[in-house]
Image: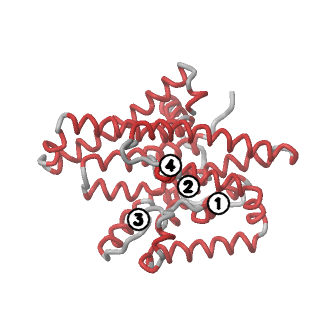
Amino acid sequence: MIQRNINADFIKTISIFGVVFINSVPIFGELKLLGFLSDAFRFAVPCFIMLWAYFFENSYCNKPKEQRLKYLTTRFIYLFRVFFIWSFIYFIITVEWQTVNLKSLVTTHFLGYGWSGQYFFIILFQLIFLYPLLRKVYAIKVLRYLTYIISILLYFNYEWYHATIPEQILKLGGRPFYFWLPYLLIGIGLARNDIKKISPWFALVPFLIGIEFFILESLHLRHLVYITLGVFVCSILFCISLLKNNRIQINQKTENLIQFIGSNTLTIFVSNPLIVIIIEKIIAVNTLNEIIVSAPSWMKICIAILTVITVFISTLAIAKLLHKSKLAKIFV
């Protein structure tokens, strides 16, 4: 039996819960406290990129050179299969047949705008395609540090001078690979053990992201939710502080749960928007939204948190069902 990295699974567990939280909370409108937590959870996707690169590099470097192209192709085909199946499912559920045409079919439903999380696959497709080249960038120290410097300047520009960026470029959102390049390089560095251990207290820094977003909102500054310096720095510190630390000591039942979640993050990632859509439809049919809107703030918060937990548990049930029915081989 393969020994799993419990620290990596712990990061995955917190991160995937953060993704579910971000997607589920808006069902009942904006609530400041939960909005702050949603902002703080923006470290989740960068952490997934770093962990993806960490495991990908470990596998890639252990392959003979003549097998590496085949490995890249296999991983790309696997991700594309999952991407296409779930994009098709969400297309069937959400498409408006009266207005759909070939252009909207491709751009809206299959290029990263179709469902929450679809953009993540678009990012990974780019990184896989460029992976051999990006490894060379990491290997040359000057290029590596130059990449970090350029990334910091890019993030700074997008955060504080967002209004000066042409609208056509902004329409790309956070999908271009260059936004995620520093996370990939950090992941490679972690895999090669080039990055030193830091204090586990740095795992608390994501709360600074919430403060950063509050400041940006107070200054009426538009920004992309993943392209800010706070998200950039806090995500890296969070991931390194936990992954490079001593093995987390927890009881066996908790470890088993974390390992289950850690090994099923892709299933949770692709299925949680489906549960959110179902809940939204139930609310709409029963006109529950009007009741919830008029409820006191403390009740709205309780309902929102209960919804997050419901969505999360539902995705775990889907993961269990897919494995038991052997359908996991098709869907994930």
| Among the two numbered marks 4 and 2 on one chain, the one whose residue lies closer to the N terminus | 4
Q: Is residue 206 above or below residue 166?
A: above
Query: Dot 2 lies on which element?
Result: helix
Report the amino acid beneath label 4: Leu
User: Where in the figure is residue 17, as x and y percent of width and height?
Assistant: 43, 44
| Among the two numbered marks 1 and 2 on one chain, the one whose residue lies closer to the N terminus | 1
Image quadrant where one finds the C terminus: top right
Report if the CB atoms under discs 4 and 2 are less than 8 Å apart: no
Query: Dot 3 lies on which element?
Result: helix
Front position among marks 4 and 2? 4
Query: Dot 1 lies on which element?
Result: helix
Q: Is residue 310 above or below residue 297?
A: above
| Among the two numbered marks 4 and 1 on one chain, the one whose residue lies closer to the N terminus | 4
Separation (CA) of disc 3 from disc 4:
43 Å
In this rendered view, identify the residue nearer to me: 242 or 11.
11
In this rendered view, identify the residue nearer to me: 203 or 12.
12
Residue tagged 4: 102
Quadrant of res 138? bottom right
Left or right: residue 121 compared with residue 217: right
Image quadrant where one finds the N terminus: top right
Report if the CB atoms under discs 1 and 2 are less than 8 Å apart: yes
User: Where in the figure is residue 293, as x and y percent of width and height?
Assistant: 16, 48
In this rendered view, identify the residue nearer to me: 272 or 7.
272
Residue at 60% from the left image edge and 44% from the top image edge: 247
